[in-house]
Image (tube, grey):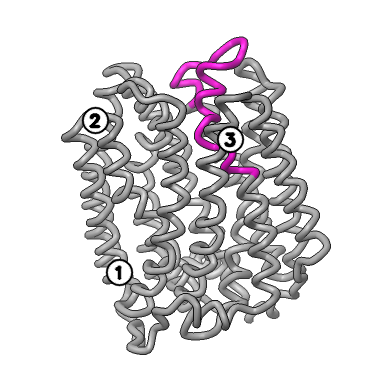
Amino acid sequence: MALGKSAMEFLGLRRSMVGVLAMAILVGMGEHMAERFLPIYIMALGGGAIAIGLLNGLDNLLSAQYSFPGGYLADRLGEKLALLLFNLIAILGYLIVILVPTWQAVIVGAFFFLSWSALSLPATMGIVSKVLPKDKRTMGVSMHSIVRRVPMALGPIVGGACIGIWGEVLGIRIAFGFAIVVSIIAAVLQQWLIEDREHARSSDAEGNPLRLWGQMTPQLRNLLVADVLVRFCEQIPYAFVVVWCMKMIEYPVTALQFGILTTVEMLTAMLIYIPVAHFADRTHKKPFVVATFAFFSIFPIALLYAHSFWPLVIVFVIRGLKEFGEPTRKALIMDLAPEGRKAGMFGLYYLVRDVIVSVAAFGGAFIWDVSPEGNLLLATAFGVLGTIWFAIRGTDLDSAPATK
């Protein structure tokens, strides 16, 4: 029993955290069964590269637009009530895709189902910062990242199997039906497990992003600049990775094989989260974030030279390693955010970042139409630039001493 309690404390597993993790697994499972294959779904319904680029651009733009209101509502309503509202919005988007099988309906539904991650993340980080002490926040964020990777790993395999059995159109609609079911279960569990905390709601939550921007520290702004550049590297080719693997290379992979590649990526990330979090909570944060940015930069150039399944396995291991310091980066945002404004500041950070990065997501489609290889090379250049920026300008903070 003592050993179990010690392990729970080491991993930061308190009741509200368990509720957050259960929600991440269930909602994520439904989400990733279908969303990873949406570019293929759009093509099957008659959409082209521009439609795919539009979806990817919307993903970034809407994530940006939703991040700040998500943080504001979490501060204003409390994280528990806010998360229930965000679940209902995502379910509405899934219903639109199921009921109207056209690529245009995917774009309309995206305004709702793409809201989940952006709206819920500030609330989730707010719960982590309130439930766990400072020297356990990186571990808490890492546990959230680990369990998020479980559905990211398994969802595409199940989704790929659905496509194999029912085809590229009906299979994805069935996957979205499953997403509705697990989202409802997740809503029930999160309301039961996440504790109502005193002062969870704030009547003076800052609703003006310009005033909140004035409270952002120079250290956090330097991280933001580097993050924007590195996300250009990620998003320029992001929507077309599945197209490259299944349509463009010399020996294309099947939908199920692509699901396996995604599993390789997620398993790689999951294996490194806990040891990295343990050391990041006790040592310097900067090297972990620099390593993450470096792996982001390597992925597109490695993908360029992978033309069959087994080389792609190595490339997707590299893609998994890009998560090396992601929990550390998120924990650093929360550490640098002012008290009483943590969810709102987290949302503002993502608002600014993703509005800018949405340009890369939209532009990536036009670059892909001209040259898929050029798309991957340009992405690499942005990643290298962002990595160098943070290596030179980034803040290197010591973590708080571990509590006894």
Residue 256 counted in the magenta span:
yes
Mark 1 or mark 2, earlier in chain: 1
Q: Which residue is mark 1?
A: 82
Q: In percent of the image, x 42 and y 42: which residue is there?
A: 151
Give the x, y percent position of residue 54.
Answer: 42, 39
Q: Residue at x 19, y 42 (%)?
A: 95
Q: Quadrant of the C terminus?
A: bottom right
Residue for badge 3 = 237
Name the residue carrying label 2: 174
Question: Which tag, 1 or 3, sits closer to the chain's start?
Answer: 1
First to last magenta residue range: 233-258
- Circles 1 and 2, Cβ within 8 Å, touching? The answer is no
Between the residue at mark 1 and the residue at mark 3, the CA separation in whole angstroms equals 33 Å
Task: Look at the numbered disc 3 and give the secondary structure of its residue.
Answer: helix
Occupied quadrant, residue 328: bottom right
Q: Amino acid at mark 1?
A: Ala
Question: Quick one: label 1, few (<14), some, or many (20+) residues within 10 Å?
Answer: many
Q: Position of residue 281 (x, y in %)?
A: 67, 69
Residue 5 visible to an observer of this rendering: no
Name above or below for residue 40 compared with residue 329.
above
The quarter of the picture where residue 137 lies is bottom right
Q: Is residue 51 above or below residue 163?
A: below
What label does residue 24 carry, if any?
Answer: none
Residue 390 at x, y percent in the picture: 76, 60
Q: Amino acid at mark 3?
A: Pro
Q: CA distance from mark 1 to mark 2?
A: 28 Å
